[in-house]
Image (cartoon, rainbow, N blue to C red):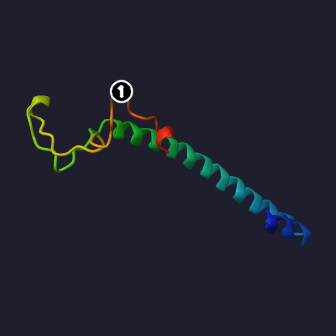
């Protein structure tokens, strides 16, 4: 738009109008591309929703849940449950 203003000041309205038309054409193409991109994004999202969760390579194969083997656990050994345990603000 700065170039269009400069051309108008230089008394070159034909060149300014040509540049305005080019800008309008570029804006229209950009709007079409945005619309197409939205469709592609939706299609990609629907494809991703169809993909299953990938298991870690360390997960052993098994027929069903009963064949699961506990390889490791975390967090449970630090948790103290039961009566008589102090609240977190009592410990501090």
Q: Which residue is mark 1?
A: 83
59 over 82 or under it: above or below = below
Quadrant position of the N terminus in the picture: bottom right
Most extreme residue toward the front, as rendered?
Answer: 84
Under circle 1, the secondary element is: loop
- Give the side of residue 83 with respect to residue 67, left or right: right
17 over 6 or under it: above or below = above
33 over 79 or under it: above or below = below
Q: Quadrant of residue 23?
A: bottom right
Q: Position of residue 29 (x, y in %)?
A: 60, 51
Residue at (10, 41) in percent of width and height:
61
Q: Position of residue 27 (x, y in %)?
A: 67, 52
- Give the side of residue 81 with respect to residue 59, left or right: right
Residue at (9, 36) in percent of width and height:
62
Residue at (27, 42) in percent of width and height:
77
Q: Quadrant of residue 15?
A: bottom right
């Amino acid at each position: 738009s700065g170039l269009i203003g400069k051309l108008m000041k230089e008394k070159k309205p034909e060149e300014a109008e040509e540049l305005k038309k080019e800008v309008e054409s570029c804006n229209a193409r950009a709007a079409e591309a945005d619309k197409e991109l939205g469709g592609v994004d939706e299609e990609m999202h629907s494809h991703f929703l169809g993909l299953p969760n990938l298991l870690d390579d360390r997960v052993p194969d098994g027929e069903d849940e009963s064949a699961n083997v506990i390889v490791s656990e975390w967090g449970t050994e630090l948790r103290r449950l039961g009566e008589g345990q102090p609240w977190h603000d009592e410990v501090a």
